Image (spheres, rainbow, N blue to C red):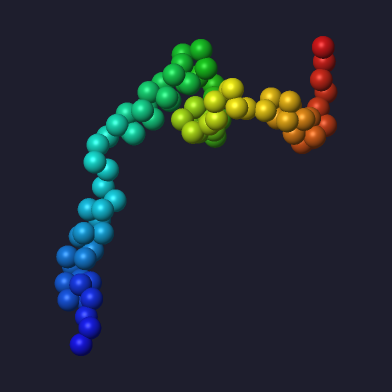
Amino acid sequence: MDMTYSEVMPNMAKLLKCCIVLPVSSAQCERGFSTQNRIKSRLRTTLNNASINDLMRISEDGSHTDSFDFKMALKMWKEEKNRKITA
């Protein structure tokens, strides 16, 4: 008779699953708020939530500028849709 731990003690298994995903510290949350405060300053209060979210993701997870291909990004931006570019 092979019974798994979750079959013998289902409530304990659920509790342990919850404990596994709890963060050890709040450092990640604090970094997120610091990033948000740097991005959404009093001079940039008109940013919508989607823009703030995108800028925060770039700030926290984006690549560094020394490894970023600016020419490729400009090419992709130009090809995305027709834009009126003025000099």
x and y percentages locating residue 65 in the rendered image: 58, 23
Q: Is residue 52 visible?
A: no
Q: Quadrant of residue 3?
A: bottom left
- Residue at screen point 36% across, 28% down: 31
Q: Is residue 11 above or below residue 65?
A: below
- Residue at screen point 73% across, 26% down: 71
Q: Quadrant of residue 15?
A: bottom left
The one nearer the camera, 66 or 30, is 66
Query: As drawn, is 55 to the left or to the right of 13?
Result: right
The one nearer the camera, 77 or 4, is 4
x and y percentages locating residue 21 in the rendered image: 29, 51
- Residue at screen point 54% across, 25% down: 64
The image shows a total of numbered marks equal to: 0
Q: Quadrant of residue 16?
A: bottom left
Q: Is residue 68 visible?
A: yes
For the N terminus, which image quadrant? bottom left
For the C terminus, which image quadrant? top right
- Residue at screen point 24% across, 36% down: 25
Query: As drawn, is 22 to the left or to the right of 62?
Result: left
